[in-house]
Image (cartoon, rainbow, N blue to C red):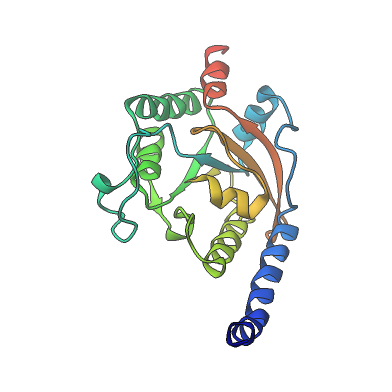
Amino acid sequence: MRYIRKYYRLLPGLLLILTLMGLIQEAAGASPDETAGPQPESLIKDLQAGGFLVYFRHAETDRSQVDSDRNNLSNCSTQRNLSEAGRAQARAIGKAIRSLSIPVGKVITSPYCRAKDTAQLAFGKAEISYDLRFGVGDDAEQTAYLSQALVGMLSTPPEKGTNTVLVSHTANLKEATGIWPKPEGAAYIFKPVDGENFKYIGRLSSDAWSGMAASL
């Protein structure tokens, strides 16, 4: 009986959290079809004009490593880091984007080393935001907060004539939009709408950038 009373005391708070998460999903246009969207040629042309958010899942990682200290994210030795293939992948993405004359403004990343390194290797810069950190293992309230923060980022127009790049993780995008970004290195394109919402445009694999650059 004691545990039942405790459950009912917690119920209003749990319902509030679930409601907030539902509103976030609704605002984001929940669960868009990530297989739909323009062909790479059309996406590249759009990006060349600027005005989009490009969400990258970090580049390929060394799966023999694990995250063992979430309290000190400046210590790369306690994290799953980019593999050599992932470092090459990030460099190739950045090189192709420059070859395609796609203007990149802000580059905002998770504080995890694999995300920061992806950004630095691809774009030569990284503005760290703890709102993009890996949220797996957080409680429901923190998960809802990170989702809402990402919704806000995806709804914020880039500086005129540029695209904003976000480098983060899987769960963040899944919770905010319903999209599970895969594999590592994939990019998902969003268009801010009225400064308060956003529209999912399409997906580019890590190889698509280089493939389009090679076709020039």
Q: Residue at point 61% right, 34% down?
A: 47
Q: Quadrant of the C terminus?
A: top right
Residue 46's place in the image compared with 2, above or below, is above
For the question of whether residue 159 can be seen, the reply is no
Residue 125's place in the image compared with 197, above or below, is above
Q: Residue at point 70% right, 26% down?
A: 42
Q: Quadrant of residue 163?
A: top right
Please state the horizontal and vertical placement of residue 100, each as a whole percent of the image: 53, 24
Please state the horizontal and vertical placement of residue 38, each as a whole percent of the image: 73, 29
Residue 179's place in the image compared with 182, above or below, is below
Front-most of 48 and 210? 210
Residue furthest top as drawn = 215
Count every numbered label the image shows and give the total: 0
Image check: 95 left or right of 199? left
Residue furthest front as drawn = 1
Please state the horizontal and vertical placement of residue 200, each as a whole percent of the image: 70, 43
Residue 107's place in the image compared with 88, above or below, is below
Image check: 35 left or right of 159? right
Front-most of 94 and 167? 167
For the question of whether residue 17 can be seen, the reply is yes
Front-most of 19 and 115? 19
Q: Quadrant of residue 182?
A: top right
Image check: 61 left or right of 69? right
Q: Quadrant of the N terminus?
A: bottom right
Q: Residue at point 64% right, 75% down?
A: 14
Front-most of 38 and 4? 4
Q: Quadrant of residue 40?
A: top right
